[in-house]
Image (cartoon, rainbow, N blue to C red):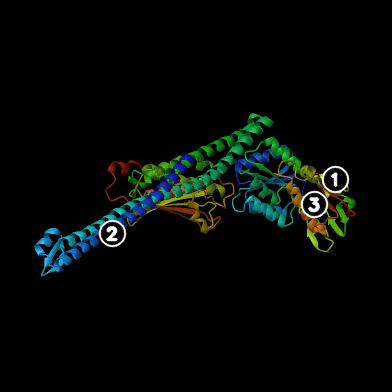
Amino acid sequence: MKAVRVFQLTALALVVVSAVQVGWWLYDQHAYAVEKVRAARAAYAEQTAAAQALLDSGAAPERVQQLLPGIVIERGHAALAPEIVRALTTEEERRYRQYAWEGSFFLLALAACIAVIARALREEAHVREQQDSFLAMVSHQFKTPLASLQLSLETLALRTPGPQAARPLIDRMLADVARMEQMVTQILESARLERGRVELKTEPLQLAAAVARVVAQFDERARQEHISISSDIGPTLTVVSDPLALDVVVRNVLENALAAVKGAGGGNITLTARALDREVELLVRDSGVGFAPAEGRRLFQKFARLRSGAGYYGTGLGLYIVRRLMELADGRVSAHSDGVGQGASVCLTWPAAPAGALPQAAASQEMQP
Amino acid sequence: MSVAAPGHVLVVEDDPNLAAGVMENLRAEGYEVSLAGDGEQALSWLAAHGCALVILDVMLPGADGVTVCRTLRERGNTTPVLFLTARGDPADRVRGLEAGGDDYLAKPFHLQEFLLRVRAILRRWDWYRSASATADTAMLRFGGNEVDFRVFRARAWTGEAQELTEKEAMILKVLVEHAGQIVSREDLLERVWGYDVFPSTRTVDNFILRLRKRFERDPANPRHFLTVWGVGYRFLIEGGP
């Protein structure tokens, strides 16, 4: 890391010095050319003056012409040959153009190098800063379940409870481990999204079937926590999205909704969808703890967590991942709540698939639950 | 402020698993335990109830633990606070303790150490309370100042009413108990804070400066809170050189 930085700074210094040198070289060359042309003009002027003197002293024009071939004589008047005048002017202009073009090209190239290196340096500093705050956040997120795990284990060691009393401790430990596992998954996922390493393969999908698959995975948990999940999505609604991305998005939104409803001591979650102009909108509504309306936007930022939900924990990455995936899939996501205790809704919008884009077999394969 | 119920601990922790673990262990040690899930809940609970100790998580949804502790102190509540935090760097510790915390434990922590610290805080407060229990020990008069240890209030020689922080009161109590003798900075740290919570004994010096400012006629030339160079402090009720 440090070696790279030294290299970059050295390169930057070298390029800057080179730019200054090129500039100086151009100036010098130009001055030299101008000086040469001026000297040539002076020499020719002397020749012209000499020719004129010879003519004035009565020398034959032919003889003078022979001696000084660059001079033309018209009616006893010596002048520089027009082609030489032209050649001098052309040479002067050619040199001037050459320096202007080559010089500006070199300087531009060097300026581009400086810009690229400076940008790299700045970006690196920015990345380092982000990594630092990311690491601080991640370590904080991990320390709580870790502390809980350690506490449970030390409780087992200190108090040696019977199997009956140990059961809740073991359940807590399992939950802590599951939570850390989820965090690792989400952190990796968000890191991949961050680096742009995710390429979505979009295809037409039947929304009802895709959502039903995710909902089915939450059925058991919802039952245990006294939460009813109902979905009412027309079988004709099709969206263009990456199937895996859609799965992750719906799962994360449902995960949040479940936590919010659990925080309110139970309730219901409803999923509805409708076709808009060239888009399909999925609305996930819950009767959970809700949030202050002003927080709707903040929720999609990295490491944003609900302020209202006591007892709710998360990585603060779930909705961030949702937002990034929706952006990549040309979709949108927003969250609304009328306030704490008022429930919340998350609105997901995908581009609609053109009519007939879906193979018939896939469309009729699965119906909503 | 309500009277502190001995042996009652309030746990302020938003993580349900960690809270359950802490509470179970405190109950197993014979403490009565209540739970608050966030800062607001904690403050409203403390406004209505008294307890012997607050276990306060620093990272809470809404108002964080440090803010809760500061608010508590501003309200005149002197209940001791033990901070739990995922961040354990010295700057963070100082921030927590300056907000009026009594001790600081970084997550993940050892159960035995946690219980030890809880016991230590409660023992210090037991000592302070029993050392201020009689009419004789509850009040201190020196140099025109009057201190009431039970309510952490004082009237300075200027006639101005003073609200002491619990640490100031404790330091004063230790000094008074050893009036005329030299008390080292380390002793003061040990008696008032417990163990390695503060990074340096300089903290003690700051508290002594604050006490001088409150009670000395000329804080630059103290007559009651005397520095014994290189060792510590000596308190003189009558006022000395």
Residue A117, numbered label = none
In the rendered structure, which amino acid carries the disc numbered 2? Val
Q: Marks 3 and 1: which is nearer the front? A: 1
Secondary element at image label 1 = strand
Q: Marks 1 and 2: which is nearer the front? A: 2
Q: How far apart are labels 3 and 2 at the CA level? A: 89 Å
Visible in this render: residue A99?
yes
Query: Which residue carries the number 2 mark?
Result: A34
Query: Which residue carries the number 3 mark?
Result: B169
In the rendered structure, which amino acid carries the disc numbered 1? Ile
Callout 3 crowding tier (Cα within 10 Å): few <14, some 14–19, many ≥20 = many
Residues B34 and A54: in front is A54
Q: Chain of mark 2?
A: A
Callout 2 crowding tier (Cα within 10 Å): few <14, some 14–19, many ≥20 = some
Residues B45 and B175: in front is B175
Secondary element at image label 2 = helix
Q: How far apart are labels 1 and 2 at the CA level? A: 91 Å
Q: Position of residue A348 (x, y in %)?
A: 41, 52
Q: Residue at x 85, y 61 (%)?
A: B157
Q: Residue at x 79, y 55 (%)?
A: B211
Residue B182, numbered label = 1
Viewport quadrant of the C terminus of chain A: top left
Visible in this render: residue B41?
no
